[in-house]
Amino acid sequence: MRRPAQRAPADDFGENGRTMRERISWNVVVPLVAVVTLALTWGTPPGPSLAVLEAVLLIGGVLAAVHHAEVVAHRVGEPFGSLVLAAAVTVIELALIIELMASGGNEAATLARDTAFAALMITTNGIAGLSLLLGSHRYGVTLFNPHGSGAALATLTTLATLSLALPSFTITGGRQEFSPGQLEFAAVASLLLYLLFVFTQTVRHRDFFLPVAQRGQQSPFDEESHAEPPSNAAALRSLGLLVVALLAVVGLAEQESPAVEKLVSAAGFPHSFVGVVIAALVLLPETLAAVRAARQGRIQTSLNLAYGSAMASIGLTIPGIALASIWIEGPLILGLGPTQLVLFALTVVISMLTVIPGRATRLQGEVHLVLLAAFVFLAIIP
């Protein structure tokens, strides 16, 4: 007579094995290795080998941050998940800008402006355009909520105008500069606008920012319908690892910043292109998360990430820079130049035409990507 298989020990072992694999997976190991490497090499000018190692760990830290932010987002749900990643990205950006401004002297006078504007163009044209293109490639016509996206775009336009466009026309401060009083007003207004939007997005009109089902989808969460939300313990573990990954990314990016500046100079690009590189680096987690959401038909989530990141980049970075300007000497040029103003105005108009109908085809995505290409090209050849 055949004995019944004893499955309990095997199941227990399998569960323990899965738990152990989760604890030693790459997204756990990489942030820890990156932090240890950062601690051992802090303050040491990196040679070629160390620079390559730090660059690899930097990319790994970014990817790990994306993973852990998505775990937290899956636990707390939308639109809170988008806010977690946007806030994380802004911490990286602000730390890099302040560090480079403190060590760059007058050459870094436009760094905050260049980085914030680059973030604006990358998010509104790059992330949004790529998401619409990928979504329309799969579903034909992408659907999203025009009320939520329109509110985000209106807030973003106001933030960018107050902080980046107006300094080009005010006369109290220097050329393209705010006076101290004007800078204080812009910082307070930016922070207030961002907080008002967050309240609207998470409390008052949260339904405006929830994913919309695409044609052929029973639910915008079809791709994740079989995935249970992580436990509180798993979410807290990912939150802790997210903080570790962000610390590693900030520190390694600071270590790599001299190499980035040398590469930009060696390539013959203007010094302002450093801001583009910083923005592209810190927005990589948002880009990956938005692309993944678009492939799953959650276009509204992608737009939340795009516009939310741009708003955080301006609404939180400008107040931080204003506070840092108390002890950082040198000019702070925030006003956009003529070419940047034209690109900003065109981006706002095209984004409005994209958002208002609540649906878009691949053409809208391609138009936004062409605008991004024009921005990058003119940043290299002003």
Image (cartoon, rainbow, N blue to C red):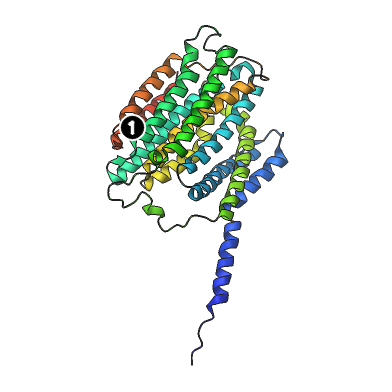
- Give the mark count: 1
**In-front residue for pair 115/321:** 321
Residue 112 vertical placement versus 246 (above, below): above
Residue 127 seen in the figure: yes
The answer, for residue 268, to whether it is visible in the render is: no
Residue 293: x, y in percent? 41, 45
Inspect the image, locate mark 1, and give the three-letter code of the amino acid beneath it. Answer: Val
> Which residue corresponds to mark 1?
355
Q: Is residue 368 left or right of residue 109?
A: left
Which residue sits furthest top? 171
Badge 1 density bin: few <14, some 14–19, many ≥20, Cα 10 Å: many
- For label 1, the SS is helix
Residue 79, located in which quarter of the rendered image? top left
Near-viewer residue (53 or 160):
160
Q: Residue at x 45, y 19 (%)?
A: 161
Measured as percent of width and height from the top left, residue 358 is found at 30, 36
Residue at the far front in the pictured view: 204
**Quarter of the picture holding the C terminus:** top left
- Residue at the outermost bottom position: 1
Q: Depth check: 19 or 190 in front?
A: 190
Residue 276's spot in the image, x, y percent?
Answer: 50, 27
